[in-house]
Image: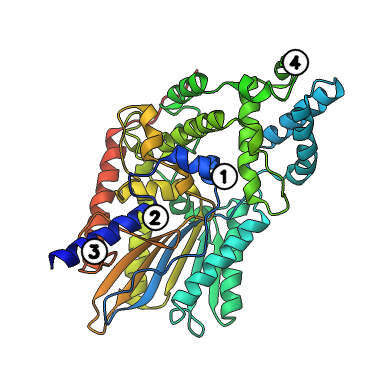
Amino acid sequence: MEMKRFFLFSCIAACLSVTGLGQTRNAFEEIRQEPDRAGTVLYMYDHDIPPCAKPPRGYKSFYISHYGRHGARNHSSETDFDRLNELLVKADARGLLTERGKELKRRYDLIYPVLHECGGDLCDRGFEQQHKIAGNMYRAHKHIFRRNARIDAVSTTVPRCILTMSAFCDQLLRCNPRLEISMQASNSTMYYTNPFSLYNKDVQPTDEGYNNKYAYWQKAYHDLRDELLHPELVFTPLLTDLGILEEVWDPLHLECALYATASGLQCNGKITESLWDFIPMDELLSLYECYNFRFYASKGPDTLFQKGRQWAFAWTTMQDILDKADEDISSGACPVRLRFGHDIIVMSLLALLDVDGYNTPVADIRDVKDVYRSYDFPMSLNLQFIFYRNHAGDVLVRMLYNERDLALPIPDCGTAYFYRLEDFRTFAEQRINLAHNIIATTQAPPKKS
């Protein structure tokens, strides 16, 4: 018995390490091995998934509740693309480019036309990702998508999310043209598809969004950036006169523009060039640390600045998942609920659900990189709550994160990753109540003059 127990714990530990929950990983070392990870949430994940855990004997899946991020997109800032192009054009015209600078311009001349006026747009690889996820879901639970099963899909009103929903549902229809799929993108559902919008009545104007200029953590972020980043390390090998930087933009902003543009190239199948080799590795790691901190503080388990206030807003999404599950299980009318939105919602849901590794507080901002890895929130990330039932009517729930098993901090049913519905509901409701309390006892950031 002891040997079996040891084997079970060993397997669970191995799975936690794979899904990103183990604390033995070193983000900087992983970035050195695969620079695309430095792109934080622009990272692309592999959809060739390993086999998932099998349910207990006699249980069969019958209901799916899903929240997915939009597919791979271009970096969202048009300004970054344009200022970087302006710098290279001006420097070239004045003969200020080194041989390395000329190589950067040669590559960027191929890249810029593809990105120009396409900031934030869903890319070809984003469509491909959704086709794969939908196909995987269909094959794993084909009996749920039988005949003319009803599928309900909702999206935020952002175009890339709407297109993502369409791509996902299109693939399901390719698998079974008889499915009855309803799709909606409406302000009426924004309070749970994007709980950080003002459609959520808990959110105050200075709470809204991701990179909120009023946020309590903004000063710490800018201080960290000023401490760690050195634009001259990036541009000295490229330019014979760094004075031209100030003519175009602040050098720090230009460095971040190059970094952000390089990060997003992995998302676009029309681009074969890379820009990572123009950023020294140590500086790339510093850029990652700064941007990673921003995600942690904005929508992660931050207790240094906002005391959990931001992730707490995601209670509306979790409540919708619970309420719709109760309604659908009771009626049997809708076996699949699909929601499409943004990475920050899933970040906060994992903090709300107290999943180990995604809800770890830190004592110092320099420790964030060691406990929170924003590339674990890649393009097309998704949460799937799969419900199973036996002939006696007992219901179990499992959670998949990016199509891989994920453990909750509650006792399982005796089979790893599977939880009794009543235990899951009780736990989720307790966490929702905690979120209510956090919102009630914290204050929105004040407006800055």
Q: Which residue is mark 2?
A: 18
Mark found first going from the N terminus, 1 or 4:
1
Q: Is residue 306 left or right of residue 4?
A: right
Q: Nearer the viewer, residue 344 or 150?
A: 344
Q: CA distance from mark 1 to mark 4?
A: 30 Å
Q: Position of residue 276 (x, y in %)?
A: 63, 38
Q: Is residue 135 left or right of residue 363?
A: right
What kind of residue is marked 3? Leu
What separation in Å lies between label 3 and label 2 (alpha carbons)?
A: 16 Å
Does the residue at mark 2 contact the one at mark 1 (Cβ under 8 Å)? no
x 52%, y 58%: residue: 46
Q: Which residue is mark 4?
A: 241
Dot placed on the residue nearer the N-terminal end, 4 or 2? 2
In-image side of 332 versus 390 (left or right): right
Check the image and tell me how it is coloured.
Answer: rainbow
Which residue is label 1 attached to? 36
Q: Amino acid at mark 4?
A: Asp
Q: Which mark is residue 89?
A: none
**Quarter of the picture holding the N terminus:** bottom left
Where disc 4 sits, the SS reads loop
Q: CA distance from mark 4 to mark 2?
A: 46 Å
Badge 1 crowding class, 10 Å Cα cut-off, few under 14, some 14 to 19, many 20 or more, is many
Q: Label 3, on which residue?
A: 8
* N-terminal-most mark, 2 or 1: 2
Image coords of residue 219 (percent x, y): 45, 21
- Which x, y percent locates residue 294? 46, 33
